Image: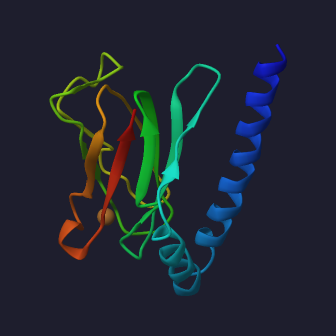
Amino acid sequence: MRRVLAVIVIVLGLGAGGCSVWGMEGGPGGAGAAVATASASVGPVDAVPGPDGVQRITVSLGDDLRMHPSVVRVRLGTVAITFHNTGAVPHEIRLAVGPGSQCASATRCATSVDSGNLDAGASSVVRFAVDRPGTLPLICIYHQSSGMTGSLVVVA
Ligand SMILES: [Cu+2]
């Protein structure tokens, strides 16, 4: 019981942190985006397991054509990534989960998962399972050539 409460507190704390990051990026234009780009290159950001064991993280997509964060680290198991378009330019994120992975949801069972088209302000949750360590590429299919890429680092 005590352990469950501790987990909930941690999740709530990180959730609040995520909101403040969104606040910065949600502000008017360039300055906020530049700050977010700098912080995105610092290093991988861990997805946070919930009480159900699913590791969750939100990746924000901006008009700077970058993912925030651009490097997400997860452990083996089920992952749910929320892709949220905080800007005006549409994005669509695809993740090649590879032959060693399988989808946790019956509706998404393929070697890649896709956010679908995300117009301004839209978000979608991509849920899948990873069963071997490695680094999987995240790409925006509209802006890959502009460097709108990232990676999912899977550790044991
Ligand atoms: Cu994009």
Q: Is residue 22 left or right of residue 112?
A: right
55 vs 140, nearest the viewer: 55
Tell me the quarter of the image containing the N terminus.
top right
What residue sits 60% from the left and 80% below the top?
28
Name the quadrant containing residue 124.
Answer: top left
The residue sitting at 43% across, 69% down in the picture is 88
* Residue 134 visible in the picture: yes
- Quadrant of ligand 1 in image: bottom left
Instruction: Say how many tags the image has.
Output: 0
- Please determine whether, in this image, residue 4 is positioned above or below residue 6: above
Image coordinates for residue 55, horizontal then vertical, percent: 52, 33
Residue for point 20% across, 27% down:
100
> In the rendered view of the protein, which quadrant contains the C terminus?
top left
Residue sitting at the far bottom: 31
Display coloring? rainbow
Indicate the quadrant where residue 53 lies.
top right
38 vs 83: above or below: below
Q: In x, y percent, where is residue 42?
A: 50, 69
Q: Position of residue 109 (x, y in %)?
A: 23, 23
**Is residue 124 visible in the rendered structure shown here?**
no
Q: Residue at x 41, y 76 (%)?
A: 64
Residue 75 on image: x %, y %? 44, 34
Query: Which residue in the rendered view is the most extreme toward the right?
Result: 2
